[in-house]
Amino acid sequence: MSTPVATQPSPPPPTKDVEHPKKPLLSTLFTRPETGSFAAAIAIFVFFFALAEPFRTLPALSTVLYASSSIGIIAVGVALLMIGGEFDLSAGVSVVTGALTASMFAFQFSLNLWVGVFVSLIVMLAVGFWNGFLVVKTGIPSFLITLSTFFMLAGINLGVTKLVTGTVATQNVANLDGFASARAVFASEFALGGVTIRITVLWWIFFVALATWILLRTRLGNWIFAVGGNAASARAVGVPVNKVKIGLFMGVAFMCWFYGMHILFAFNTVQSGQGVGNEFLYIIAAVVGGCLLTGGYGSAIGAAVGAFIFGMTTQGIVFAGWDPNWFKFFLGAMLLLAVLLNLYVKNYALNRRS
C-alpha cells in the first residue's frame, strides 16, 4: 500500500500592477472651476492690450491690480460662502458699516484709532454671526436674510452718521493717534520697479492663497464643499453644517471689515452712502470665477481671476476712451456667459467621473 506524497502548491503566477489610465491634461483642465475665467481673462487682456495703448504700460497694470484687489478681497469670502451654498447681499454696505464704526468710535471718544479698528472688527463679526445664525435657525433663504440686513445697515449707516456728525460723512481721522501705523497695515503703498503697488494687492494675494489652502488641504474645506453640495447628506455623516455656515458668513464679514479699514485709512473719511450695489460685483466675480449659484463647486483662485477681469475691464474702458456706462452692459453679458460656461464645465466634469 503506497502512501500519498504531499506536494507543495505551486506559487501563484506573478501579477502585474494595474495601471490606471491617466486623464488627459485637457480633460483635467476642463474639470477645474476656474478654467473658463482664465480663458476669459486672457481674451480680455489681449483685447485691451491691442486696442488701448495706455493699457500696455506698467502704471496701467498697477492701476488694474488695485482695482481688482478692491473687489477681489471680499470676493474671496463671498466665493467660499457660495461654495457653501449661501449668499450675502449685505456685503457692499457692510464695508461702509465697518469703516464708519471705526472712524466714529475713535473720533467721538478721542481714542487711539486701533481701538476703533478692533471695535469695528467685533461689530462686523457680530453682523456675520447674525446673518448665519438666522439662516441656519429659521431656514429662511440667505438671499432674504441678508437682503434684510442690507436695508437695515444702509439705514443705520446714513441715520447714525447724520445723527452723530450732522452730515453724511465722518470727520477726518488723519490726526488721531494710531493713524500712521494703521495706514501702514491697511492702505500703504510701495515702489516696485518704478511702479507704485498698493498694499491691498499683497493682502489680496495672501487671502486667495489662504482660502485655496483651506479648500484643498483641510477638513474644513471638505466640509464647505459637502455643505454646499448636499447639506442633509453632510449632516448625516457628521459634518457640523450649522457651524460651517455661520463661520462662512463671519468670514465674509471679516473681509468686509478689512476692506472697510482700507477705505478709512486711504481716504481719511467715509461717505455713509457708499457701498450700495457693490455686493453684486463680489457675487459676479465669484460666479465668473467658476462658483455655481447652487453651491458645492468653485474656487478662490477663480474668484480672484473674476476680480481681475473686472479690474481690467473698468480700467480698459477708460484707457480706450469709451463711455463707461457700457460697463454695466458688460457686467450683465459676462454674468450670463459665465453661468452658461460654468454649467457646461460642471456637466462635463460629472460626465467624466461617471
Image (cartoon, rainbow, N blue to C red):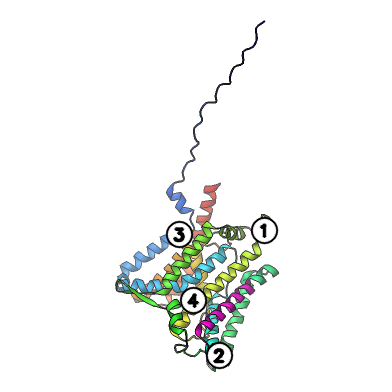
Crowding at dot 1, Cα within 10 Å, few <14 / some 14-19 / many 20+, comes out as some
The mark nearer the N terminus, 1 or 3, is 3
**Foreground disc of the pair 2, 1:** 2
Q: Quadrant of the N terminus?
A: top right
Residue 111 in the magenta stretch? The answer is yes
**Tag 1 or tag 2, which sits nearer the N-term?**
2
Give x and y (percent) for residue 91: 55, 75
Residue located beneath label 3 in the image: 36
Image side of residue 210 versus residue 57, left or right: right
Q: What amino acid is labelled 4 in the image?
A: Tyr
Residue 259 numbered mark, or none: 4
> Marks 2 and 4, Cα distance to the nearest angstrom?
23 Å
Q: Foreground: 313 or 282?
A: 282
Pointer 1 residue: 235
Earlier in the chain: of badge 1 and badge 4, it is 1
Q: Is residue 224 above or below residue 316?
A: above
Where is mark 2, residue-wise?
109
| Nearest to N terminus: mark 3 or mark 2 | 3
Real-space Cα distance between discs 4 and 3?
A: 27 Å
Q: Provide the residue span drawn in magenta.
A: 110-131
Which residue is pictured at 34% across the width and 64% down the height? 46
Q: Position of residue 71 (x, y in %)?
A: 47, 72
Image quadrant in which you'd find residue 237: bottom right
Query: Mark 2 near mark 1, Cβ–Cβ under 8 Å?
Result: no
- The verdict on residue 341 being magenta is no
First of labels 2, 4 by sequence position? 2
Residue lying at 45% horizontally and 82% vertically, measured from the top left: 265
